[in-house]
Amino acid sequence: MRSISHPEIYAIGDAATPAEDPGVRVRMSAVTATIMGAHGSDSLSAVLRGKTPKPLSFAYLGQGIALGRHNAIGFNNYPDDTPRPPYFTGWLGYLIREGFVRYLAIATQRPGIFVWVGKRRYGRAQRRQQTRAEKKQMQPRRA
Ligand SMILES: Cc1cc2nc3c(=O)[nH]c(=O)nc-3n(C[C@H](O)[C@H](O)[C@H](O)COP(=O)(O)OP(=O)(O)OC[C@H]3O[C@@H](n4cnc5c(N)ncnc54)[C@H](O)[C@@H]3O)c2cc1C
């Protein structure tokens, strides 16, 4: 993501919020910050190679919330961050959360290996917005 007023400035992480709908709401979190970091690097790399950077687009995959030592709740929140069953608690929830955290920690230290899902969601959000705007235009105006 780039600053609207200063396109040479790139914004990532908790301090940033996109002006355009990336296909899901952006919640402050480690996973969002990691995706934004990787996307920011890809964008910079594209600009340096004379290419147009792609817009931010992603989906959530799952979430783990710590509930204490060796206790957590883990669940699926694909694609729009809505919690969905089954909910894994206790040791299993802890292992799921630990898996997420370790993956993010490893990914941030090895540039290029981080992958994320939902790269087409921005396009879909744009099409939805366009359809809504077209429908609104076609509606007869009330006197
Ligand atoms: C106690 C706690 C628990 C959390 N638990 C979870 C969790 O379980 N799951 C989850 O998803 N999220 C969790 N979060 C939120 C998560 O940590 C943040 O969403 C994530 O770290 C945001 O990443 P970031 O890179 O945007 O910012 P940060 O991780 O805050 O990184 C910003 C970096 O910029 C550096 N910095 C600041 N100012 C300057 C400057 N002027 N010059 C140079 N460097 C500077 C800081 O030192 C820091 O290293 C938790 C947060 C807290 C505080």
Image: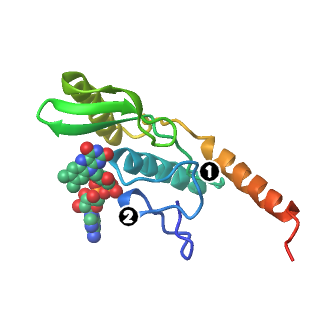
Q: Residue 2 at x, y = what percent?
A: 53, 64
Q: Secondary structure at mark 1?
A: loop
Looking at this rendering, what residue extends furthest in the top direction?
A: 92
Q: Nearer the viewer, mark 1 or mark 2?
A: 2
Q: Residue at x 45, y 41 (%)?
A: 82
What percent of the width, then of the height, locates residue 68? 13, 37
Q: Which quarter holds ligand 1?
A: bottom left
Element at label 2: helix
Q: Amino acid at mark 1?
A: Lys
Residue at 34% x, 50% y is 29
Q: Is residue 120 above or below residue 33?
A: above
The numbered mark at residue 91 is none
Residue at 33% across, 42% down = 108
Q: Is residue 90 above or below residue 107?
A: above
Q: Is residue 38 left or right of residue 2?
A: left
Give the camera-side residue of 46 and 84: 84
Disc number at residue 15?
A: 2
Task: Categorize mark 1 by other alpha carbons within 10 Å: few (<14), some (14-19), many (20+).
Answer: some
**Image quadrant of residue 6?**
bottom right
Q: Tell me: 105 left or right of 137.
A: left
> Mark 2 vs ligand 1: CB under 8 Å?
yes
Specify whether 125 is left or right of 22: right
Residue 54: give its label: 1
Rendering coords of residue 35 (x, y %): 44, 46
